[in-house]
Amino acid sequence: MSSSKTVIIVAIIAGLIASIIINNISRWLNVWNSLWGLAVAFVVFVVMGLMIEYTAPTDTKFKKIIQYVGIALAAIAPGVIVDVALDFFVRHYDRNLFPFEIIMWWVFAPLPLMAGVLLARGLFEFKTKDNNG
């Protein structure tokens, strides 16, 4: 598939843009402050997990995938800060609780991220078994 550098770049970019994508889709769907907003977040993080597993080399051990997920989680913090700055300067919307938002994503994101990784791993194994007979 690709090198570990590619996976690290994908994990960083995914973490950086996660909150921006989640907030914009939630606002567009008008589910910003509801449980449906969390459903949007769940789907975005599952897709991030799929991307991390998909870009990882095929022989990557699960322990290394956990490290890539950790990189994505670490990149969420600067992504939230960028999203808050966009809201403040572009939309003129004040999100004064943004440090807690970072913690919220750190608590929420690991489960759907790992679900995406495991889903991708299962799909690749099924496809490999199917092609080998």
Image (cartoon, rainbow, N blue to C red):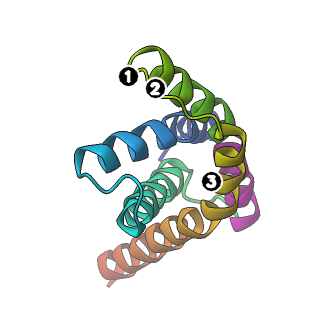
Q: Which residues are magenta?
A: 62-74
Residue picked out by circle 3 = 105
Q: Position of residue 34 (x, y in %)?
A: 40, 63
- The disc at residue 91 is 1
* Label 3 SS: helix
Q: Quadrant of the C terminus?
A: bottom left
Asked where in the image residue 92 lies, by quadrant, the reply is top left
Q: Nearer the viewer, residue 2 or 101?
A: 101
- Residue at image position (57%, 41%) is 15
* Label 1 SS: loop
Residue picked out by circle 2 = 87
- Mark 2 crowd level (few <14, some 14–19, many ≥20, 10 Å Cα): some
Query: Does 15 lie within the magenta span?
Result: no
Residue 45 relative to residue 101: left or right:
left
**Closer to viewer: mark 2 or mark 3:** 2
Asked where in the image residue 62 lies, by quadrant, the reply is bottom right
- Mark 1 crowd level (few <14, some 14–19, many ≥20, 10 Å Cα): few
Instruction: Specify the amino acid type for callout 3.
Output: Trp
Question: Which of the two labelled residues, at mark 2 and mark 3, occupies the earlier sequence position?
Answer: 2
Instruction: Specify the amino acid type for callout 2.
Output: Asp
- Residue at image position (48%, 66%) is 116
